[in-house]
Amino acid sequence: MNSFGRLFRVELFGESHGPAVGAIIDGCPPGLPLSVEDFETDMARRRAGAAGTTPRKETDLVSIHSGVHAGYSTGSPIALSIPNRDTRSVDYDQFRAVPRPGHADFTSMEKYSGYSDPRGSGHFSGRITAGLVAAGVIAKKILPFAEFGTLVRPGREGRSLDELVAEAVARDDSVGAIVEIRVRGLPVGLGEPFFDACESVLAHLLFAVPAVRALEFGDGFAAAGMFGSEHNDPIVDASGRTDKNGAGGINGGISNGNELLLRVAVKPASSIARAQYSYDFNKETMTELIIEGRHDACIALRSAVVLEAATAIGLADLYLIDRGLYTRGNKNPWRQA
């Protein structure tokens, strides 16, 4: 449904043009230092403003409603909200009759018998990921030893991302990209074989992010063209360090202590200004569709921090499961003396 996690559990709520979006985080250990200022850096990374991003202006200021007292988490659920202020719902009136190609207009109306909120794509909007980014800030605090690095790369060889975005804007179109995430400092042992493998958990979260179309770890799809002698990572010391990282930091579904490396393919935004065609359910025929409104030419630019947050949430859950912080009586590793 709308929640994820076994110990560190995240539930997202809200609609794109409703009063607010946000997240409820259950299972956050007590004693984690937390204030509204902690969210600003990552929320700013998601905010629009750069070339190729939507003109919609949202402050994305996070409010904490529960689960924090005197600057520390209490152990009870943390409720976070982010208000929606710059909405223009009239742009979406036509999509009940003429669903947009590539969007959830048709599937959501069918699944929810016409009751889903069509304004700004409702709960299917990328706007919902603001709550995911906020939850990711807390997840990163559970992983103070982890160093995250994220890069957005062009999906076409021989072209810079700036060139592709500029061309998409000039064409009233959109363009996809690749988001590469690296995480250093992870301990050995996160993940379980098979269904709760580190890759399985992260894939579950990453594919929940709108616009994600493919995911690879380490050598990824290139491994299909390799020999075993090329793909295997020789271990060079007692810590498990390897001299290369074709596995992307995971063996047997378990983190091996090397850098976690994954890449995510983000599709072009489905909402584009140039004319498209779709089925008109009122006229019962194909019709030209012009999508008005404010949309990203390259959603990967703002998706990078979202995907980083999703990765942090999955790793935080696996870390708490592995360390058994609720059952072994461990001392609080986050609160400073």
Image (cartoon, rainbow, N blue to C red):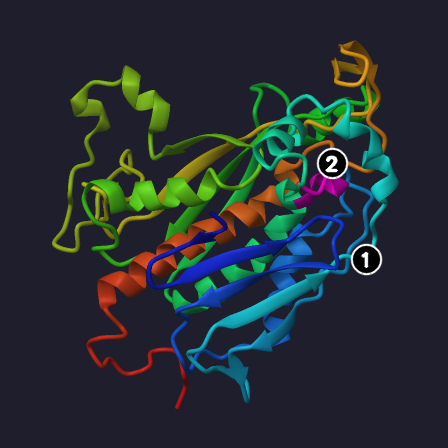
| Residue 43 is at least partly visible in this image | yes
> Looking at the image, which residue is at 56% across and 19% down?
157
Q: Which amino acid does label 1 sit on?
A: Arg
Q: Position of residue 197 (x, y in %)?
A: 26, 44
Classed neighbour count for the residue bearing mark 1: other residues with Cα under 10 Å, few (<14), some (14–19), many (≥20) = some
Q: Residue at the top extreme?
A: 285
- The residue carrying mark 1 is 85
User: Disc 2 marks which residue?
Assistant: 296
184 and 79: which one is in front? 79
SS for dot 1: loop
Which residues lie in the magenta part?
116-122
Counting labels gives: 2
Q: Residue 270 carries which label?
A: none
- In which quadrant will I find the C terminus? bottom left
Q: Nearer the viewer, residue 138 or 97?
A: 97
Drawn side of residue 123 relative to residue 320, left or right: right
Q: Image quarter for residue 263?
A: top left
- Figure check: 26 above or below 94: below
CA gap between label 2 and label 1 equals: 18 Å
Give left or right: position of 42 versus 205: right
Could you say where residue 160 lies in the image, as x and y percent from the top left? 65, 27
Q: Is residue 49 magenta?
A: no
Please state which amino acid type lies under the numbered disc 2: Asp
Which residue corresponds to the image point at 30% horizontal and 65% vertical from the top-left? 320
x then y, percent, for residue 24:
52, 64
For residue 284, which quarter of the picture? top right
Q: Is residue 185 visible?
A: no
Residues 91 and 271: in front is 91
Mark 2 Cα-neighbour bin, 10 Å: few <14, some 14–19, many ≥20? many
